[in-house]
Image: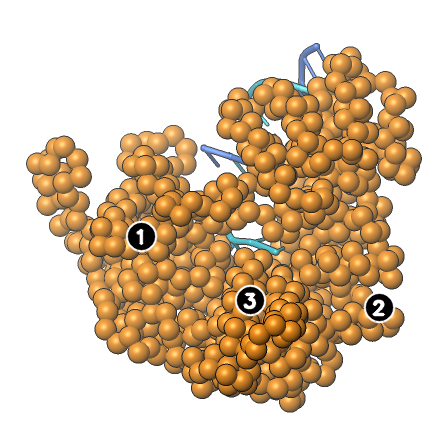
Chain colours: A orange, B cyan, C blue
DNA sequence: CTGTTGAAATTTTTT
DNA sequence: ATTTCAACAG
């Protein structure tokens, strides 16, 4: 088989639109890909096609939303390329060496892949010098950035003035939005933070000082990574070298990029040559990170040669599910109209399930999941989705009680827990002694040292250019006298370590463990986390690499840390809707579908926010392949304040399921049944409550 | 300046 | 329920 017909063979598995996209030339290409329309397959084939056509893999840049997505795509590109290589004519002997060289050349794993932030880091380590970045910069995550901002805020006395001054989290969000949307602070405040308008001047001053502080500390925050990448592309010399690195740039999830990212893209290819972007305006759910659907709408205007390919055939869901989800999104004003359809015409209609309360909901979901499992759908092919991380707490407790294993994605991550951050701070301080945030985290761990002394010590260290010897002359207070010399030894040993990374972590752990035990009363599980961290460290070649990766791409679920799961392990997936992006399961349960949760009360300020919540709901629903359950508890208990007996309120079904849409769902009410020993009693209550609930339902809905 | 205690405020999504 | 803030004693 000739190479050409081999690739034709591979491409024949795609539908005509997908094939058009995969084999498009090098003019700008916009793929509007509805949910489940095989956009990953299309991108993967496109990359493989480019490589097969002779493009050097190292000159392809694949920008994805998560590292997981990038790894998955590159793996599939590899598989495809291997398949192609096998199909090449292979006349014995001499050619086999040649063809294995060819195979090496086309390895997809050599493609540049990753998130904007991860790629930015790699480029800045390499070319940062051109714009005067220190090579050994460390990266601040959101919390670190807030901490540094707080340091500056305290210095400026803004914390004292009045309690109405925006808190660090808000201030950080404002700053971040300015950077990512490339807007002046006045505009951002007016549009998104009107209640902070009175503080404009103070905020400006605060941000200026914050920028200086970052520079002095040799750190970059998430926004800086993009900002400096963009700056690199504006520096005439550096831009030339960076631009020349890539022939093709492909961007996934383009609807969730922000203005700064679109500028980076423009910088990489001003005429759009070699540019491919994929997105779905109906799934734009990251505007709180300054992402804007406009990017995808404006793309054809910015690059007039753009070809638009729309993918509408859905390979994921059954038609009854699509009928319902199409209805949900049809109520949104939108521009790229798609009508998703499937060849899988039959299947169970999606359900709207009315539950009594949160406990009932958890119970119902678990029963239904177990029923599916009995019929052969493993737990990991089922998922429970929710708007906010804490919405799954009751369910998690119940799953644990019944020994049903689960992995949770989204919400607080392992690396964000205090003790892990503490330990990492030691490493970060060693890597970059100018990092004030790391220092002011480590130092107050010692008794007798608080924020004040810590700040002083960091100033001394900064003055000395980051040489820990500068601390030798310092006289610690009595309480810290014993530990101080040991800390000094530890840190000096870590600066130029002779041992491998896990040994370094071990040394930190030995030092930190007793302090941890004093600080927390539930220390045993935390100590175990630290042991696990030591294990993880052995997987990394360098400390810098570990620090970078743990910041940019933290393990998304606690269980991920244990390494690849055993094959016989089966576990249910719990996920925030945001973290469920791009994924799919056989059966999907969306819980807490009540107004206030979806749309979240926090996001009903303006119509745009509400539209985003609608898309969020749409994303959740379109994750389902075969079975879709939408659950809404009728009654919510108020956990707040002394629980005077039976305080509760009633929930309204989400506004995104009005009557006409609801007709595409089957409606159910949970039936309590023989779960417990007192079968009789349970049945009795059911009779009463379910009737009264139906009554209430009639009145409320 | 540190560390503790008690009161008050808050309530999302994440690179 | 948790986190953040303010006041106060050592």
Q: Quadrant of the C terminus of chain A?
A: bottom left
Q: Are marks 1 and 3 on the same chain?
A: yes
Residue at image x 26%, y 60%?
Answer: A352
Residue at image x 88%, y 23%?
Answer: A472
Q: Pick whichever of labels 2 and 1 is earlier in the sequence.
A: 2
Alpha carbons under labels 1 and 3: distance apart? 28 Å
Q: Pick whichever of labels 3 and 2 is earlier in the sequence.
A: 3
Q: Which residue is mark 3?
A: A78
Residue at image x 80%, y 66%?
Answer: A232
Along the horizontal axis of the image, is A361 left or right of A416?
left
Q: Which mark is residue A238?
A: 2
User: Would you call the spot at circle 3 few (<14 residues within 10 Å), some (14-19), or many (20 or more)?
Assistant: many
Q: Which residue is mark 1?
A: A378
Measured from the top left, where is residue A77 in percent x and y?
A: 55, 69
Alpha carbons under labels 2 and 1: distance apart? 51 Å
Measured from the top left, where is residue A659 in percent x and y?
A: 27, 69
Alpha carbons under labels 3 and 2: distance apart? 31 Å
Secondary structure category for the residue under label 3: helix
User: Would you call the spot at circle 2 few (<14 residues within 10 Å), some (14-19), or many (20 or more)?
Assistant: some
Q: Pick whichever of labels 1 and 3 is earlier in the sequence.
A: 3
Marked residue chain, label 3: A
User: Would you call the spot at circle 1 few (<14 residues within 10 Å), some (14-19), or many (20 or more)?
Assistant: some
Along the horizontal axis of the image, is A451 left or right of A648?
right
Residue A699 occupies quadrant: bottom left
Secondary structure category for the residue under label 1: loop
Measured from the top left, where is residue A168 in percent x and y?
A: 67, 45
Tag nearer the camera, 2 or 1: 1
Above or below for A346 versus A671? below
**Closest to the observer, A198 or A428:** A428
Q: Which mark is residue A439?
A: none
Above or below for A91 versus A507? below
Residue lying furthest bottom in this view? A305
């Amino acid at each position: 088989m000739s190479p050409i017909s081999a690739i034709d063979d591979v491409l024949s598995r795609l539908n005509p639109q997908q094939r058009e996209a995969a084999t498009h030339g090098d003019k700008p290409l916009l793929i509007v890909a509805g949910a489940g329309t095989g956009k990953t397959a299309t991108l993967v084939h496109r990359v493989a096609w480019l490589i097969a056509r002779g493009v050097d893999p190292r000159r392809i840049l694949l920008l994805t939303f998560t590292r997981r997505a990038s790894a998955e795509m590159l793996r599939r590109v590899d598989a495809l390329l291997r398949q192609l290589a096998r199909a090449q004519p292979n006349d014995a002997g001499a050619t086999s060496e040649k063809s294995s060289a060819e195979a090496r050349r086309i390895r997809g794993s050599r493609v540049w892949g990753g998130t904007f932030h991860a790629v930015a880091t790699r480029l800045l380590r390499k070319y940062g010098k051109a714009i005067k970045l220190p090579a050994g910069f460390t990266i601040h995550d959101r919390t670190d950035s807030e901490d540094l901002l707080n340091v500056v805020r305290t210095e400026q006395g803004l914390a004292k003035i009045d309690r109405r001054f925006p808190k660090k989290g808000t201030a950080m969000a404002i700053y971040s939005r300015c950077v990512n949307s490339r807007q002046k602070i006045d505009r951002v405040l007016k549009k998104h933070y009107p209640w902070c308008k009175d503080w404009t001047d103070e905020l400006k001053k605060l941000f200026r000082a914050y920028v200086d502080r970052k520079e002095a500390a040799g750190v970059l925050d998430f926004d800086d990574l993009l900002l400096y990448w963009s700056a690199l592309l504006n520096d005439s010399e550096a831009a030339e070298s960076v631009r020349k690195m890539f022939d093709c740039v492909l961007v996934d999830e383009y609807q969730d990029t922000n203005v700064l990212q679109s500028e980076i893209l423009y910088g990489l290819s001003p005429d759009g040559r070699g540019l491919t972007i994929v997105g779905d305006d109906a799934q734009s759910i990251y505007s709180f990170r300054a992402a804007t659907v406009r990017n995808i709408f404006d793309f054809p205007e910015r690059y007039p040669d753009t070809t638009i390919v729309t993918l509408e055939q859905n390979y994921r869901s059954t038609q009854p599910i699509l009928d319902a989800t199409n209805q949900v999104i049809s109520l949104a004003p939108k521009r790229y109209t798609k009508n998703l359809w499937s060849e899988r015409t039959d299947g169970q209609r999606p359900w709207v399930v009315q539950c009594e309360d949160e406990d009932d909901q958890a119970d119902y979901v678990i029963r239904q999941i177990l029923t599916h499992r009995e019929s052969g759908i493993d737990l990991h092919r089922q998922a429970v989705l929710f708007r906010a991380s804490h919405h799954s707490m009751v369910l998690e407790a119940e799953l644990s009680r019944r020994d049903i294993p689960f992995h949770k994605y989204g919400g607080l991550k392992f690396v964000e827990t205090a003790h892990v951050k503490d330990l990492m701070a030691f490493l970060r301080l060693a890597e970059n002694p100018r990092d004030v945030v790391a220092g002011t985290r480590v130092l107050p761990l010692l008794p007798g040292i608080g924020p004040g002394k810590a700040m002083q010590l960091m100033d001394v260290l900064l003055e000395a250019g980051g040489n820990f010897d500068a601390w030798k002359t310092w006289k610690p207070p009595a309480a810290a006298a014993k530990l101080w010399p040991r800390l000094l030894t530890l840190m000096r040993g870590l600066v130029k370590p002779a041992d491998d990374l896990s040994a370094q972590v071990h040394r930190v752990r030995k030092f930190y463990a007793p302090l941890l035990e004093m600080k927390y009363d539930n220390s045993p599980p935390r100590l175990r986390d630290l042991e696990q961290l030591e294990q993880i460290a052995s997987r990394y070649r360098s400390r810098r690499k570990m620090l970078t990766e743990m910041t940019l791409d933290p393990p998304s679920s606690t269980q991920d840390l244990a390494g690849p799961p055993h094959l016989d392990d089966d576990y249910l997936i719990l996920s925030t809707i945001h973290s469920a992006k791009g994924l799919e399961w056989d059966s999907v349960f969306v819980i807490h579908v009540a107004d206030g949760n979806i749309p979240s009360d926090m996001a009903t300020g303006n119509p745009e926010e509400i539209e985003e919540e609608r898309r969020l709901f749409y994303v959740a629903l379109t994750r389902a392949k075969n079975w879709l359950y939408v659950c809404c508890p009728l009654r919510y208990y108020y956990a707040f304040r002394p629980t005077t007996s039976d305080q509760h309120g009633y929930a309204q079904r989400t506004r995104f399921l009005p009557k006409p849409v609801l007709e595409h769902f089957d409606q159910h009410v949970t039936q309590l049944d023989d779960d417990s020993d007192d079968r009789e009693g349970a049945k009795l209550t059911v009779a009463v409550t379910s009737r009264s609930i139906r009554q209430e339902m009639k009145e409320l809905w």
